[in-house]
Amino acid sequence: MTIGLLLALAALALVDSTSFGTLGIPVYLLLASKRPGGLLVYLATVAIFYFLVGVALMLGLSTVLERFGDLLRSTPAYWVQLVLGVGLFALSFKLDPKGKPERRFEPRVGGPRVMVLLGLTAGVLEVATMVPYLAAIGIMTTAGLTAGQWVPVLGAYVLVMILPPLALMGLRAVAGAWLEPKLERLRGWMSKHAASALSWGLAIVGFLLARDAAFYLFFQRP
């Protein structure tokens, strides 16, 4: 496990931490209630959901690699990865919703069951757009990490994803009056620009995939 691999995963986790499910909804919940219980239940649900999805994907991809590992690590496969990375980067500009009206969603705080359901709903809705997470799973799989290596790395990944709202929660506890108007502005900004997060996510993931493939094809290949 290299430093470069860990840095790439950390970058992807930070991108994931800015999604609507991991930052947007928590900001709404912070402003909707001064009690942290509901938000903690929501974040725990999101983290567990992502972790379990990641475990399932890692086990599935590991099985695929056992059968097609040499093919997936071949030069043609890296060319496909390079094209995919460049394609995702180009697609990000097409999906940038500048000038387009965006739908707004404002969740409300409820009991533990409601928060668990909200967390599961957010996770399920974002499965189709969790491009950074899927890229991280792919990177860990192709790196050939053992279960003893990728399980804690995956756990650390989902923790990084929920760090920003946890930090906001702690900051609010000590500087609520100062933070409140800033959270209001952040909520307004995220409500207006939520869809553009997907565009940025695709751009970053495309860059990382293309960079990884280019490094192998042009600098590391024997």
Image (cartoon, grey):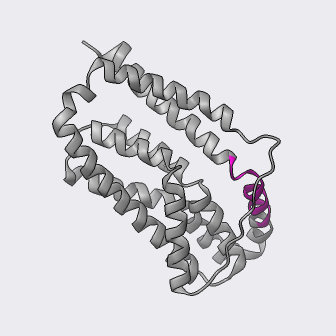
- Please state the horizontal and vertical placement of residue 125, each as a whole percent of the image: 54, 60
- Which residue is at the far left? 66
- Please state the horizontal and vertical placement of residue 202, each as a whole percent of the image: 56, 38
The chief SS type of the magenta part is helix
- Residue 166 position by quadrant: bottom right
Residue drawn at (17%, 36%), measured in percent from left and top?
Answer: 67
Q: Is residue 46 above or below residue 192?
A: below
Q: Nearer the viewer, residue 61 or 22?
A: 61
Q: Nearer the viewer, residue 162 or 93?
A: 93
State which region is magenta: 184-195
Residue drawn at (47%, 57%), measured in percent from left and top?
Answer: 160
- Please state the horizontal and vertical placement of residue 68, each as a whole percent of the image: 20, 33
Q: Is residue 136 above or below residue 36?
A: above
Residue drawn at (62%, 40%), measured in percent from left and top?
Answer: 200
- Is any part of residue 148 visible from this angle? yes
Q: Is residue 112 in the magenta section?
A: no
- Is any part of residue 162 visible from this angle? no
- Which residue is at the far bottom? 111
